[in-house]
Image (cartoon, helix red, strand yellow):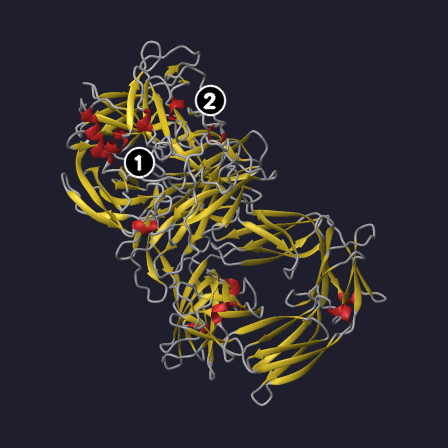
Amino acid sequence: MSRRVLWPVVVIVVAVVLAVVSSQGLDRAGETAGGMAAEGSGQGAAASSLGASPVKVGPASAESSSARQVVGASGGDDVASAVDDEGSPLAGARFVFTAWRLSHWAHGLYPTPASVESLTVDSQFAATGPDGVIEMEPDLALLSEGDYGAAVWVTRPGSRAVGLAAKEGQEASLLGPKVVLEDAPVGTALVVDESGAPVAGAGVIARAHALPIGSALEVTRTTHARALFWLQAITDPAGEAVLPAGPGPIAGLPDALRVCATTADRVSSWSELPTGGAARLVLHPAFEVAGTVTDYEQLSPPGSMTDAVAIEWRRGREWERCAEGILRPEGGFGPIRVPFVVDADYRARIDSQALEPRPTPIAEAAPGASIQIEMPGIVGWWLRVDPRAEGTDELLTGAVVSASWVEQGSRVRQLANVDGRLDDDGKGPFALVCLPDVGVVDLHVEAEGFAPVEVAGIRLPDRACETLRIELRQSSTLEGRVLGLDGEADFAVLLIRSALGGRLARVGVDLDREGRFVTDRATVGAIKVMAVVDGACSDVSASDGVEPRSVELVFGPPQSLVGTAVDSDSREPVPGATLSPVAWLGGEEFSADDSVVTADAAGRFEVPHRRPAGSSLDLRVDAPGYRAATVAIPVDSGSGGEPVELALEREVSGAIVLLSTTGIDFEATSFRASGPTEVPAGWVPADGIIATAGLARGQYEGTFHEIDDDRVHTIWFSVATSDERIDVPVDGPGTIHFALSAEPADLDGARILIDGTPGACTQRLNVDVPGTTVTVPRLPLGTWTATLYDRNFDKLGAATVSLTADEPALQVNLAVEPATFVVRVVDGAGDPVSAATVVAYTWQGKERRAWSTTGESGQFTYRGEAADEIVFDAYAPGRGAVLGVPSTRAVDGVLELALAGGATAVVRLVDSNGPVASVAVSLANLNGDLEFQSGVLTDADGRATFAGLAPGSVQATVSDPRWMPTTIRAEAADPPAETEGRLYRRASARITVVDASGAAVEGARIGIRKDAIGDFELQLYAAFYGLSSVPSGFVTGPDGHLVVSGLPEGKVVVGAADDTAAGSSVAELEAQGEVEVRVVLGS
């Protein structure tokens, strides 16, 4: 069964015409609406379940609309009438009775009109006299023809729109209630031509964003812009038209109508008309768009909600919706009248509850033109979002949930269906539908009293059909000031993240003339904050959480970073490379803004920014066929000086080939991998070939799972070049029979890890131990090392065997090594500490010898060597730690480890620009097995402070892609000791190796050392440091060349050797650049 299914949304919707002024206006409205509505027949999939009595529909308040109980109208005679809040009759209220048909339904983020002909055929209009009673009786027989019963909508200038709905067959119940109209100010639409002159006699059409309606479930559903609320007015000699208020703010949608102006040959785009506000509508010459959606009849079965087609234009940076129409059952639409503007781009989208809104370009637009297009019908993916309050786990039923993604240089937003819950009581997860077939979407969730949350980078279809639980933290007030803009901006976006980590909050704020702002939507507690204005980022400021909270956010002067994007191998320019701003908050990367700079045909780019002096400009660089990377460039680079050069590393396109000699059914197996690029879990193709296209170069750890046999292989492999084939034998004729010399109690929960390199990659099998004998069949021939571990992953014994064609099956005895001593962990009072983690390793931290957790007695048994260079560390959260106890201190078979916690370590980070602020630092013991604290941010002086430690040596680590991974040995002491750690930005080296005659040397082995990091060669730890080479393997190619990427800036020693000679050279590498290095063998 396909994973992609249509999201089952059951919605209750009302479609209605509110007012008609003239037949001329109706004709104009029909032209703007675009085409006939789809006429429905029979009872649809979402039939009304309203009770026998009519129920009041609206008006709504922003606070209560999402879960408001339905309010019944006051009692009255069997006539329709309108009264104000005090019960006094209202004259001039317009009643519109309509038969509620399937063809009146439409879906989408915006209001979308059915054809006027469809609405007016089914509708009857009446107005109240001085006594507040309508002057005509509606034709109930006509109303009874509605597929979902009948409805009446009432509107009046100075009041909000109100509606009643009756169950099918009980239309007479609409005549009895007195409709109570709430006071609301009118809105004014000014219609002008392209010169700005007012236009009299133009038709103005209005649509509501959403309409609430009651149901038998006693839950008020909110129909987001699908109800066909429609009214029209004609402009006076001053070009103005007065319009009543709509049904009010509903579930995060604006308290506004959407309005459009039309005449016989001209039309405006749709604009917002706030309640009590004004809108300016500019008439432009019109052209028409019509067309079809492929396979629409199959994709939208009978009873489905009517879909819409939206026409968008782009006159600047963003795409905007300018016209719309509905889709007919056979998939046709239009003609839709569209305003024409010189130099505007146009495109069409499907606005649907099931189909992906993929854009279709509209070419050759011109006044009076009739354009035909064909749009692809592609079923979109869906997600469920379950918003909860952090701490209380309360379901936030009033939340506003949306998804967005960037497409064709603009962000597209899709609002969740508030009425599309899984549960009939409306308390299930929110539904996001029609998401892109392939791509990355960002989720945004906000709720009253909570800081908004952004979840970025949801990949589709990998994450499709999931339910995502998202927790929101409470919000509180934040005041602040933006400096450096000199009153140039009146709006900013704040990027806010708790100092404790978690999701990003993106909050818009208004700025006064002095740059001051205040918001009550900031994450509670200590926070990190950055401001973004027109794509430019400020510095990062922090608040310690003490109320009242305030921050100052500094922008630098306007400047630009100029440079060139090049291929890291060929040094050829990379046209079309994109650069977008990145925000670093709390040690994590977030998209700062949707603004994108694209490199020209020569790879040149210019990125405007306003980063202050002494900081860096963080950019995300991407290009088709290349590995995306984040770079940090000092603000003085490329600004009025030498341009920077950004070297992009090509993605590879090869394959991992799983080889089976026993006939594995690969379609019943799965594979996933982690590394520089994540490979999500998926089924293996029948031929066992897993493409590596799109993967970044580097080291990977893969998991191959034979599901039927529950046999799991861990495979380590390296991706280095394009068109590379990596053969991995996953079975063979070999068998190992293990006999375990151990007590059954020692084997409870034990496992055998079998490691070998039968092909191009090292792999491991993880085998359960059901008893004292274990047989492992189907092994590839080769050398295997088997290690027996107990339940705490302490090593019990090991053996190495070689399986050959002559001896494919072997008997192996795995004997448990005798106990050396007992390790006992105690607190300061000498009492045993259970659940403490204990690790033994060589004192330099290079090799782990044991790892375990103490039981209730505070003890575990150590089997292994006792020597001065083997030390023990122990850690129990909240109880303390002990560091560096030599194994030789065991007395009478017991090594006692006493926990302590009064020491402090301070690590200060600097790079070539000085102290580095807001970088996340983690602290662990020397071998990295015991992590004491993580994500501690450096202050403005680059210091990260760790308290509550045991005295002794510890290691701090920094894993931030802006710099090379860094490990810093520090001391925890009382009083605190400070250690300075140097961060190195990445660089590249193009190495040429020649012999004494100057001839190129192929196959020379390259070693690179940086004394400031350690007395070892960096390429030996390429996976940790993120180094890669072309050709792969850090060996020169036929031309004697080798390019190494990911190296540290500054002084390095490059060594080269073949089987006959060696040589070395000292080079000074530049951050974000590439340096030529020449090594002569024999020098």
Residue 741, compared with residue 472, is above or below; it is: below
- Residue 367 appears in view: yes
Classify 10 Å Cα crowding around label 2: few (below 14), some (14-19), many (20 and above): some
Q: Nearer the viewer, residue 399 or 172?
A: 172
Three-letter amino acid code at the position of disc 1: Thr
Name the image quarter holding the N terminus: bottom left
Classify 10 Å Cα crowding around label 1: few (below 14), some (14-19), many (20 and above): many
Query: What is the spatial separation of the Cα atoms under label 2 and label 1, in whole angstroms?
Result: 28 Å
Q: Nearer the viewer, residue 783 or 1046?
A: 783
Q: Which mark is residue 198?
A: none
Task: Report which quarter residue 53 is drawn in.
Answer: top left
* Marks 2 and 1, the one that precedes in the sequence: 2
Three-letter amino acid code at the position of disc 2: Gly
> Dot 2 corresponds to which residue?
72
Residue 1082 appears at what percent x and percent y?
Answer: 45, 80
Task: Report which quarter residue 654 is drawn in.
Answer: bottom left
Residue 1044 appears at what percent x and percent y?
Answer: 43, 67
- Residue 536 appears in view: no
Mark 2–mark 1 CB contact (< 8 Å): no
Label 2 sits on a secondary structure element that is loop
Q: Which mark is residue 112?
A: 1
Q: Nearer the viewer, residue 1057 or 852?
A: 852
Residue 188 appears at what percent x and percent y?
Answer: 29, 21
User: What residue appears at the point 15 percent right and 30 percent down from the top-left corner?
Assistant: 264
Task: Report which quarter residue 57 is drawn in.
Answer: top left
Instruction: Using residue 279 as the reference point, say whether residue 1071 is left or right of it.
Output: right
Label 1 sits on a secondary structure element that is loop
Name the image quarter holding the C terminus: bottom left
Q: Nearer the viewer, residue 719 or 880?
A: 719
